[in-house]
Amino acid sequence: MRLLVVGANGLLGSNVVHAGQQRGWTVCGTYHSTRPTFDIPLTQFDLQDYNSFDDILTEHDPDGVVNCAAMTDVDGCETNPEQAHILNGDAPGGLSAHCDANGVEFVHVSTDYIFNGTEREPYGESADPNPVQVYGESKLSGEQAVTKGTTDALVARVSFVWGIHRNRDELTGFPAWVRGRLLSDEDVPLFTDQWVTPTRAGQAAETLLNLAEQEATGLFHIACSSCVTPYEFGNIIADHIDNSEELLSEGSVDDVERDAIRPTYSCLDVERVESELDRPQPTLREDVETVRDVLR
Ligand SMILES: NC(=O)c1ccc[n+]([C@@H]2O[C@H](COP(=O)([O-])OP(=O)(O)OC[C@H]3O[C@@H](n4cnc5c(N)ncnc54)[C@H](OP(=O)(O)O)[C@@H]3O)[C@@H](O)[C@H]2O)c1
C-alpha cells in the first residue's frame, strides 16, 4: 500500500504516518506550516490550493489518501468563517474529486461538532447533523462535498482528539494540559456539564488504516466507548499521577468565554466501526493506560 497523508504534521496525521510505517507501507505526506522530521517524501501543500491536488497525486502516486488537514481552531473559524469554509468545506471536496478521477482511495476526517448537542444518548452515524458554530458548519459542508463527488470515500468523525504526537514524540491535547498543571501543583478546573467520547489519535490512526485496508466506505464514528465529562477524564489522568486528585475542581462551560459555542453533549456511538472491524473500541481507561508511562 502506498499511502499519502495530507497534514502529516498534525496530531492525527503524524499518527497515521506512524501507523502506516509500522505496517511496512510506503508512506508519503504533505505539510503546511511546519515540515515534520519523518524520513518520508514530503511536499508542502496548502488546502487552499485544492485545485492543484492533481500535481500532488502525480508526484506521489498513492493508492490511498488520508486527509487529516483542517482548520482546527474552533474559535478561529468563528472569527474567520470564509477561511474555515474554504479549508474545511471546499478543499475536502476538491481532494476527493481528484482522488476519484485518479482511482485513488480517499479517507476524510470530520468531527463530532457537526451535532448540536441536544441529545443525551450517543449520536449514531445516521443522526441528523445540526452544527451550532462555524467550525461544525464548515466541517459538515466538507463531509457533504466529499460524498457528493463519489460514493467510494470513507468519512470518519472523531471527537476530542488527544494522544502522542508522533513527530514531536510528546503527549498532546487535553491530558497534556491536565498533566502539566498537576505536575506544577496548579488547580485544574474541569467541566462537569460537557460530555464527549475522547478519541486517542494512535487508536484512530490504526482504526482508519484497518477500515481502509478493508476498503470500507461511508460514514464511521471513531472514538473510545466511554462518554465522559472532562472532569471524569481528568480524574482518570490523575489516577496515574501521585497525590494529584485534590487539585481537580468542578467547573462549568459557562465559566469560560469563547468566540464559538460548543455542543454540551457530542458523544459518538461507535457500534458501526466495532461491527465493521469485529472488535470493540477501547474504553477511555484502556486508552489512557497505553500512555501511563508518559503521564508519570
Ligand atoms: N483536535 C480535536 O479535538 C478534533 C476533534 C474532532 C475532529 N477533529 C478533526 O480531526 C482532524 C485532525 O485534527 P488534529 O487534531 O490532528 O489537528 P491538528 O493537530 O491541529 O492538525 C491540523 C493539520 O492541518 C494542517 N493544516 C492547517 N491549515 C492548513 C492549510 N491551510 N493547508 C494545509 N494543511 C493545513 C496542519 O498543518 P501544519 O501543522 O503543517 O500547519 C496540521 O497538520 C481534522 O480534520 C479535525 O477537524 C479534531
Image (cartoon, rainbow, N blue to C red):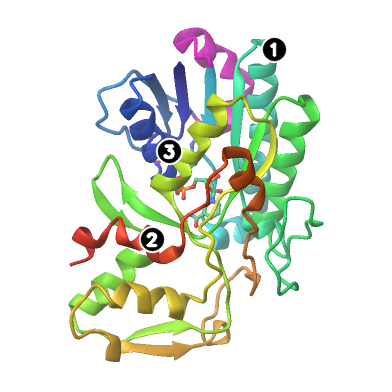
Mark 2 or mark 1: whose residue is earlier in sequence: 1
Which numbered mark, 2 or 3, is in the foreground of this view? Answer: 2
Res 286 label: 2
Res 101 label: 1
Image quadrant containing the C terminus: bottom left
Label 1 secondary element: helix
Q: Position of residue 290 (x, y in %)?
A: 30, 55
The residue closer to the viewer here, 94 or 197, is: 197
Magenta stretch in the rendered image: 46-63
Q: Residue furthest front?
A: 278
Res 13 label: 3
Q: Please give the name of the residue rendered at 82% of the width and 57% of the height, measured from the top-left corner.
A: 128
Asked whether the residues under the numbered discs 2 and 3 touch, taking CB atoms below 8 Å apart as contact, a structural biologist would say no
Asked if the stretch drawn in magenta spans residue 35, the answer is no
Q: Please give the name of the residue rendered at 45% of the width and 40% of the height, measured from the top-left corner.
A: 205
**Ligand 1 under 8 Å from disc 3 Cβ:** yes
Asked if the stretch drawn in magenta spans residue 55, the answer is yes
Label 2 secondary element: helix
Q: Looking at the picture, does residue 36 appear above or below residue 121?
A: above
Instruction: Please name the predominant secondary structure of the magenta segment in the image.
Output: helix
Label 3 secondary element: helix
Which kind of residue does numbered mark 1 sit on? Ala
Asked whether the residues under the numbered discs 3 and 1 touch, taking CB atoms below 8 Å apart as contact, a structural biologist would say no
